[in-house]
Amino acid sequence: MAGDAVEACMDAYYRAFREADIEHMMDLWADRPDIVCIHPGSPRAHRGTAEVMESWLLVFSRELNIGIEPRIVGRFETDDSLGMVIEEAITRPGDVAPTGTILISQTWRCVDGGWRLAFHHASHGRRADPSPEGMFVAGGGTQTRH
């Protein structure tokens, strides 16, 4: 049962993200003062429903025409909690293959019979090294930033 929940949560999250649908995104979050969301490059953690919503509005206000290929690299499941670590391969406009990654950890809780996000932390992963011609080489580079 939880395996199906993992797929359903991922599908709902990426649908809301790709469509830049703030209502759908916020429907995925628990309505609690202790939820936390951190975006790549964010100077701080966004806490509570209002701050989390504002943070997603800022994300959705930017151009989001990037390709995202999510892959679960770690997960845990209980009857009332789901945790996932996801590596997103990112393809930017003009690139023919992924040139970077975003690393995400999420915690979902079963609240009132539905799965809701409690924590989301996304950070920059590795970025491909430029080729001698100045183009990014897919799969290149092994540097990570912490």
Image: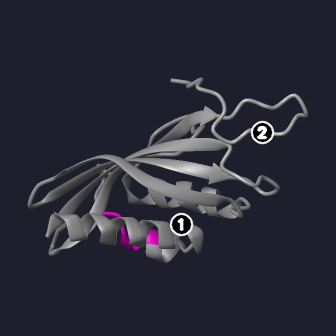
Q: Nearer the viewer, mark 1 or mark 2?
A: 2
Point 63% across, 38% down: residue: 139
Across and down, in percent, residue 134 comes to 88, 34
Total marks shown come to 2
In the image, residue 26 sits, relative to residue 93, either above or below, namely below
Point 79% across, 31% down: residue: 130
Amino acid tagged 1? Phe
Across and down, in percent, residue 59 comes to 62, 57
Judging from the image, what secondary structure is the residue with disc 1 in?
Answer: helix
Q: Quadrant of residue 140?
A: top right
Name the foreground residue: 117 vs 12: 12
Give the mark, 1 or 2, whose residue is nearer the N terminus: 1
User: Seen from this angle, which residue lies furthest right?
Assistant: 133
Q: Is residue 29 magenta?
A: yes
Q: Quadrant of the N terminus?
A: bottom left
Report the magenta residues as a range. Answer: 25-31
Image position of 83 (left or right of 92):
left
User: Seen from this angle, which residue lies furthest left?
Assistant: 79
What label does residue 136 carry, if any? 2
Point 15% across, 75% down: residue: 113
Camera sees residue 53: yes
What label does residue 17 carry, if any? 1
